[in-house]
Image (cartoon, helix red, strand yellow):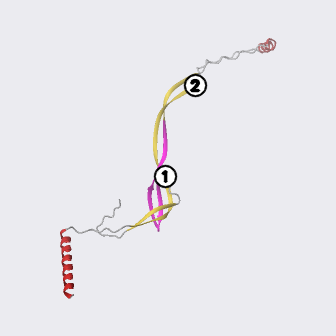
Amino acid sequence: MRLYRHTLLGLGLSACAAVTAAAQDTAPVTVLPVENVRLDYAQVLAVEPVYQTLRASRTEMRCEEKQPPRPPVQPQEEGRWTRIVDSVKGVFTREPEPAPKAEPVRPSCRMVPVEREFRRPIAYDVDYVYKGFKYRSRLAEDPGNRLRIRVSVMPYIPGQNLATP
């Protein structure tokens, strides 16, 4: 039995030596720590919309009514007897006095470029606080009073790139 144990022990050591030799031929294996992730809520402090300004122009028909210039009216001097005769004559003849003829109004139309400006929100700058720290993010929608956030914790490894995708 003792011989059997030494044989197994010898086989185990030789197998371990073979694995170690194979490991020395390959590059070292880099072990990346697993990211610990959970979801939580942050308190929203302020939401500021980010606007996109759109400009559009089109031509519209604009018409102005122009009245032809009137010649100046010369006041006629009438005497007192002329006015009395005219008023009595109007009572007996019962003909309505002819209204002064109005000259036709001619519209003056032309095409005019009209510029319009539209503003629409395309994003929202959100200030929020989580665990006493203030953050700012640009979001596609207004989150309201609370913002659902993704919290990630990983150990720091010197020399590892800290930038996140």
Which residue: 44% across, 58% down? 137
Question: Which sits in the foreground, 71 or 23?
Answer: 23
> CA–CA distance between discs 1 and 2?
45 Å
Q: Main secondary structure of the magenta part?
A: strand
Question: Which sits in the foreground, 44 or 34?
Answer: 34
Residue contact at pointers 1 and 2, CB within 8 angstroms: no
Quarter of the image with the N terminus is bottom left
Span of residues in magenta: 115-141
Residue, disc 1: 49
State the SS at label 1: strand
Q: Tell me the tag on residue 65.
A: 2
Question: Which sits in the foreground, 26 or 94?
Answer: 26
Residue 21 position, x and y percent, is 18, 73
Q: Residues within 10 Å of mark 1 (few under 14, many from 20)?
A: some
Give above or below for 151 relative to 141: below
Residue 131 belongs to the span the image colors magenta: yes
Residue 24 position, x and y percent, is 19, 71
Of callouts 1 and 2, the N-terminal one:
1
Q: Residues within 10 Å of mark 2 (few under 14, many from 20)?
A: few
The amino acid type found where label 2 is placed reads Glu
Residue 103 belongs to the span the image colors magenta: no
Which residue: 47% across, 57% down? 126
